[in-house]
Image (spheres, rainbow, N blue to C red):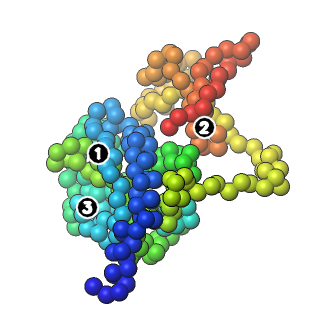
Amino acid sequence: MNDTQALVKLGLASDRAKRASKRLEGEARTLETAVKRALPHLVRRKIPVNAGESAPVLHGEALASLERPFHVTALRIGGHAAALVLDGKAIGHGLDGMLGAGRGEVPTLDPAGLTPAQVALATRVARGLVASFDEALARSGMRVELATEAADAQHGSVLVAATVKIGEGDATGSIVLLVSAAALDVAPDGAPPPSPTPVAATQAAVADVELEVVAELGRVRVSLARIAALRVGDVMRLPLPVDSMARLHVGGRALFSGKPTVKGSQIAVELSRHDP
């Protein structure tokens, strides 16, 4: 082992790595919820979703333990390089939800690599997970963004790996979020680093920016033929109870939930804070 390797190994046991691991492990339930939201067929079929312990790891070691073929999405978290990795079984669960209506028939993929069509579908699954992770972790000050290009800074650096297992038995897949320890580092007392406060001039500059506000009562999947046959006055039933809460999206992000109601002659939504 050379001096550089020795220093990197030492970094895995550093206080920074331990604090970073503890912070990400504290988001275990949040990550589980985010996976279920991105892959709703797991909930419908009662497929187990469990987040394990977070631990410091080297980039190469994290990938070596995963079942091939895996799919890697380059990310940025807190200005640092990160990655989302889906192993072969996790990709299979995603494909089952998209193509098999979530029947639980997880396809077996070629360990040598994904086909172009499988890569395209795995990318869609990964992007959905990234959006869900970003929404769920934003309240903890962690913004998860797609990287414009793959970053080599991950290799040889100390990362923290948070693994979410989906399925059970031989069909168990792994979704791994790899985050730089530097992006997760917290103060010794466990408090997260303070968020920067926008200056008044910046707040004033964006005060008049208009955002689209959408109240979403529910979603339903219908065939193209059914859509083509719709006429004015037709009723499309949603698989939701009448007293279900609506999610209010602002600028594409779910910020509030609300109860549909009536105010005077207007249909309204009574708002409350949205919990991921």
Task: Say what amino acid the circle numbered 3 marks.
Answer: Leu
Q: Give the Cα distance between marks 3 and 1.
A: 14 Å
Query: Which residue is at the far bottom?
Result: 2
Q: Can see residue 38?
A: no
Residue 222 in the image: x percent, y percent? 42, 31
Viewer-nearest residue: 12 or 91: 12
Is 117 or 8 nearer to us in this picture?
8
Q: CA distance from mark 2 to mark 3?
A: 35 Å
Task: Name the image quarter holding residue 110.
Answer: bottom left
Mark 1: amino acid: Ile
Instruction: Using the image, tell me which numbered label, if any, was put on residue 166.
Output: 1
Q: Where does the N terminus fall, quadrant-wise?
A: bottom left
Residue tagged 3: 66
At 67% from the left and 36% from the top, the residue drawn is 213
Q: Quadrant of residue 2?
A: bottom left
The image shows residue 59 at horizontal and vertical percentages of 35, 69
Rendered image: mark on residue 255: 2
Rendering coords of residue 121 (x, y %): 37, 53
- The residue depicted at 53 percent of the width and 24 percent of the height is 245
Q: Is residue 210 left or right of residue 230?
A: right
| Kind of residue indicated by mark 2 | Leu
CB under 8 Å between callouts 3 and 1?
no
User: How many other residues sit within 10 Å of disc 1, few (<14), some (14-19) or many (≥20)?
Assistant: many
Whether residue 198 sits left or right of residue 253 in the image: it is right
Q: Is residue 253 left or right of residue 129?
A: right
Q: What is the crowding at mark 2: few (fewer than 14 residues within 10 Å), some, or many (at least 20)?
A: some
Secondary structure at numbered mark 1: strand
For residue 272, above or below residue 2: above
Q: Residue at x 64, y 23 (%)?
A: 269
Can residue 56 be spotted in the picture?
Answer: yes
Residue at screen point 42% across, 32% down: 221
- Mark 2 vs 3, N-terminal side: 3
